[in-house]
């Protein structure tokens, strides 16, 4: 039994390290966080960004493994969905900005001066989509 538990521990630790390394590689190699800080002009909050990413990853891991249920009013659910939407929207916008997807696309279709509007539409769409999902489809 001890060997079985030790084996499970080692496999779980190795899997966690592999996923964590992949997540850090994703953020580091593509430069998502530094580009997000540069675009939002919030260099003075760099420690807050770092702490938020670490705490978010740890909290997400805990929620994945535990059967934690929240019961909260819709107002708090809207706020929770807003936070999810902001995260996904900003991450998607930063990723596409880093990969130069939208600048190339706007240049090809001839609407370069409207790039900021395209990015804001994407971000706001992700925010409102997350809010819609959290308010109407999640039953906690």
Image (cartoon, rainbow, N blue to C red):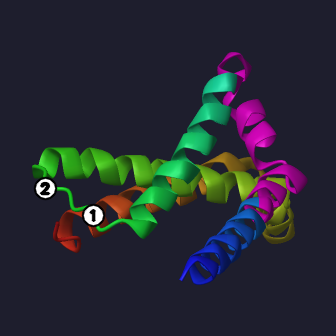
**Residue 111 in view in this figure:** no
Residue ID at (27%, 64%): 134
Which residue occupies the foreground of this view, 115 or 124?
124
Residue furthest to the front in view is 2
Label 2, secondary structure: give it: loop
Residue 83: x and y, percent?
41, 46
Residue sitting at x 16%, y 71%: 139
Counting from the top left corner in percent of width and height, residue 80 is at 31, 49
Q: Residues within 10 Å of mark 1 (few under 14, many from 20)?
A: many
Q: CA distance from mark 2 to mark 1?
A: 13 Å
Where does residue 30 sit, x and y in percent of width and height?
Answer: 85, 55
Is residue 108 shown left or right of residue 83? right
What is the span of residues highlighted in magenta in the rendered image? 21-46
Q: Secondary structure at mark 1?
A: helix
Among the two numbered marks 2 and 1 on one chain, the one whose residue lies closer to the N terminus: 2
Quadrant (top left/top right/bottom left/bottom right) for the C terminus: bottom left
Residue in the foreground of this view, choosing between 14 and 93: 14
- Where's residue 118, x and y in %? 62, 57
- Find the residue positioned furthest to the top: 44
Q: Which residue is mark 1?
A: 134
Question: Any magenta on residue 27?
Answer: yes
């Amino acid at each position: 039994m001890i060997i079985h538990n030790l084996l499970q521990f080692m496999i779980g630790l190795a899997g966690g390290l592999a996923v964590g390394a992949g997540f850090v590689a994703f953020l580091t190699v593509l430069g998502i966080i530094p580009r997000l800080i540069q675009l939002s002009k919030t260099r003075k909050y760099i420690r807050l960004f770092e702490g938020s990413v670490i705490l978010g990853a740890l909290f997400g891991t805990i929620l994945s493994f535990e059967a934690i249920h929240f019961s909260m009013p819709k107002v708090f659910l809207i706020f929770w969905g807003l936070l999810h939407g902001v995260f996904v929207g900003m991450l998607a916008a930063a990723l596409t900005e880093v990969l130069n997807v939208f600048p190339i696309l706007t240049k090809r279709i001839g609407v370069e001066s409207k790039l900021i509007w395209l990015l804001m539409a994407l971000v706001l769409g992700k925010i409102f989509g997350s809010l819609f999902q959290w308010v109407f489809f999640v039953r906690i």
